[in-house]
Amino acid sequence: MKKFLISFMVLVSIFMLVGNVTAQEGKYAIIVKNAGNPYNEKEMDGFEKAINEIGGEVILKAPAEPTAESQIIMIEQLITQHVDAIAIAGNDPDALQPALKKAMSRGIKVLSLDSAVNAQSRMVHINQADPEQIGRVQIQAISEMIGGSGQIAVLSATSQAANQNTWIEWMKKELEKPEYDQIELVKVAYGDDLRDKSVSETEALLKSYPDLKGIIAPTTVAIAAAGKVLTDRGLQGEIELTGLGLPSEMAEYIKNGVCDWMYLWNPIDVGYLAGYAAEALVTEKITGNPGETFEAGRLGSKEVIQAGDGTEIMLGAPFRFDKENIDQWKDVY
């Protein structure tokens, strides 16, 4: 009987140990801006890959519409599911704060990616590239395309998108340089990261500004929509287009001359980095303070750096896609 009890206790200990290991693997959730957004889908792919490598359970969330309200509902659901971490691409930098602070008060590690929430709403942010560099390089590109003179417009995502607004501010700062004196920014339009609305906004720009020479679309949905409108209207060479786009969606427009070149980073890597950062927060390898480092799988060592009143982890510099390299990338993402 004594031997039986000892054996039984050993088995119980083993099961408890296995249970603890499973618990430590954790539940990792990602909330992107909206469903049907190819860029967001690639972010989720990268996040899922990272969590699978870690050995955790992944939960993918994408609201039907790109609104803060829809994301708040999902945050509340995840709180009740007792997830270990939430990574979110915010549809509004401030409106999500109460829900995200509630999540953190329950012990859930919160980080943002792609589009930041405010520093009080998260522990760290995953940034694609330096916002200043992203904004300035798009003005430099459109200026070169239109010969340094003429009217330009910006076709953005939502008016509340923190990343878009930061990039646009840097665009405006770049435009203050003397070499852009002959360029006029006539409008910042918003397609809400919805294809049909982005098409309508592009058509409205063409109608309202018949002398328009260039469009900057710093969002993958809008640049593809603008590319289609300009192609359908046969405006190659008349109105230039650049911005941030997915190679798979923009290959056609780069090859037909509607968009000479554009920029982006790999959204798969953005999500992948967010997955490893979430795991580092859950296992307390990092807390979100500047100077901390962790290993991010195939991306190698990454560091937490100061950014404004919060901290971030930088993926890398924006990459230029043009006719010379688009075929190498269009089947990747």
Image (cartoon, grey):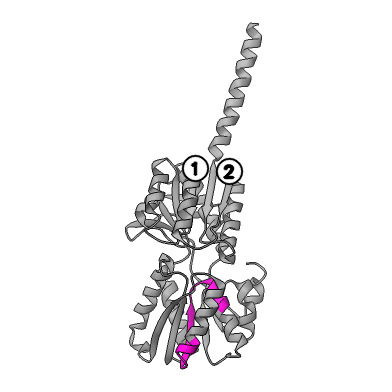
Residue 128, visible in the rendered structure = yes
Q: Nearer the viewer, residue 326 or 84?
A: 84
Above or below 300: residue 207: below
Q: Which residue is mark 1?
A: 84
Q: Position of residue 285 (x, y in %)?
A: 45, 44
- Magenta stretch: includes residue 221: yes
Magenta region includes residue 281: no
Write the residue at 65% across / 6% down: 1
Q: Nearer the viewer, residue 292 or 241?
A: 241
Element carrying mark 2: loop
Quadrant showing the C terminus = bottom right
The CA span between labels 2 and 1 is: 10 Å
The stretch of residues the image draws in magenta is 206-225
Please state if 48 lies on the left or on the right of 87 as rendered. Answer: right
In which quarter of the view is residue 248 placed? bottom right
Q: Which residue is depicted at the point 43% across and 56% down?
A: 125
